[in-house]
Image (tube, helix red, strand yellow):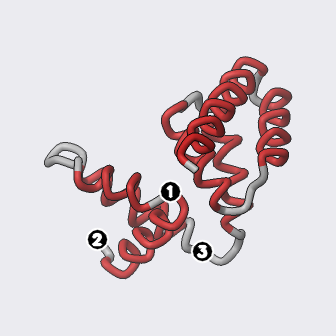
Amino acid sequence: MDKKTYDRGLEIRTAVLGKDYVDNAIKSADDFNQPMQELVTEYCWGAVWGREGLPRKTRSMLNLAMISILNRPHELKAHIRGALTNGVTKAEICEVFLQVAIYGGVPASVDSFRIARETFKEMAGKG
């Protein structure tokens, strides 16, 4: 593992997803899934999210579309929160999910809208 890339990934992952979310993911890791936590932090967040080619807001919007189409509701909820942190508006999230309906399928979009509304409601209750 490249410590510099991992540390950069941990910094970005925490900034986007929140300290509580990341701390929980890392602290709850065991011998079985620890390698996955390291891989995600180093490569996903450090090597890719750490690149300068796209702003975090754009990366978040791309993630929302891809995760929606892949039908990964747990990850989608985390990335909706992260997208809002990265400056994506609710109106832009709506547009992303409308785009998903056309290119990824209406069922994926419908589920994504539902998950987003639940996430917005949860976030409003904590504020």
Q: Is residue 54 above or below residue 96?
A: below
Q: Are marks 2 and 1 in contact (CB under 8 Å)?
A: no
Disc with the residue nearer the chain's start (2 vs 1) = 2
Is 58 positioned to the left or the right of 1 in the image?
right
Residue ID at (50%, 69%): 12
Residue 119: name its quadrant. top right
- Residue 1 numbered tag: 2
Q: Spatial distance from mark 3 to mark 2, Cα to Cα?
A: 18 Å
Q: Which residue is mark 1?
A: 17
Residue 9 locus on image (x, y percent): 44, 69
Q: Residues within 10 Å of mark 1 (few under 14, many from 20)?
A: some
Q: Secondary structure at mark 3?
A: loop
Residue type indicated by callout 1: Leu
Residue 35: name its quadrant. bottom left
Residue 98 locus on image (x, y percent): 84, 33
Disc with the residue nearer the chain's start (3 vs 1) = 1
Residue ID at (45%, 64%): 14
Q: Along the line of sight, which residue is nearer the eye, 122 or 36?
A: 122
Residue 32 locus on image (x, y percent): 18, 43
Residue 20: name its quadrant. bottom left
Q: Which residue is mark 3?
A: 51
Q: Residues within 10 Å of mark 2 (few under 14, many from 20)?
A: few
Q: Is residue 1 above or below residue 21?
A: below
Q: Are marks 3 and 1 in contact (CB under 8 Å)?
A: no
Q: Spatial distance from mark 3 to mark 1, Cα to Cα?
A: 17 Å
Q: Residue furthest left?
A: 31
Is 7 positioned to the left or the right of 48 in the image?
left
Disc with the residue nearer the chain's start (3 vs 2) = 2
Residue type indicated by callout 2: Met
